Image (cartoon, rainbow, N blue to C red):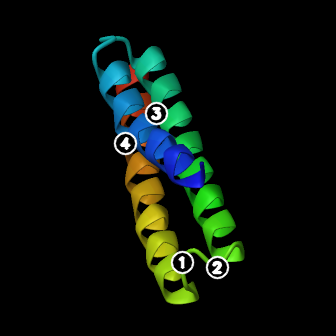
Amino acid sequence: KLTDQIVRSSRSITANIAEGYGRFHYQENIQFCRVSRGSLNETLDHLICAFDSSYINEETLNQYRFKIAQNIKVLNGYISYLKRRKEE
């Protein structure tokens, strides 16, 4: 089911951030954040499919697009921070 895929990919976002944080090594943390970023994009793709199948309307899709874009910016900032810390 599409709803199950959306739930799994969205839960994967925070789960990977948490797992990376728990590794205590910058490079591993960065890698898990990259996986999390992939899960954000996967969730967006599932939402686009939901729109294409008329399960959600365009306004709802655009709201999710905006929220996902904001989260990607925050995650990219965190990845940049980790890269700088790694190089210290």
Residue type of the residue flagged with mark 4:
Tyr
Residue nearest the viewer, comparing 20 with 30: 20
Q: Which residue is mark 2?
A: 54
Residue that appears at 55% across and 85% down: 57
**Extreme residue toward the front, this view:** 1
Q: Mark 1 and mark 3: span between their CA atoms? A: 28 Å
Residue type of the residue flagged with mark 1:
Ile
Instruction: Compare marks 2 and 3 and give the one earlier in the sequence.
Output: 3
Residue that appears at 37% across and 42% down: 78
Instruction: Compare marks 4 and 2 and give the one earlier in the sequence.
Output: 2
**Is residue 45 among what the camera can see?**
yes
Where residue 40 appears, as percent x and y from the top left, is: 52, 50
Q: Which residue is mark 3?
A: 33
Q: Which residue is mark 4?
A: 78
Q: Quadrant of the C terminus?
A: top left
Residue that appears at 28% across and 15% down: 22
Q: Mark 2 and mark 3: span between their CA atoms? A: 31 Å
Marker disc for residue 56: 1
Residue type of the residue flagged with mark 3:
Cys
Q: Mark 1 and mark 2: span between their CA atoms? A: 5 Å
Q: Nearer the viewer, mark 4 or mark 3?
A: 3
Q: Nearer the viewer, mark 4 or mark 2?
A: 2
| Quarter residue 15 falls in | top left
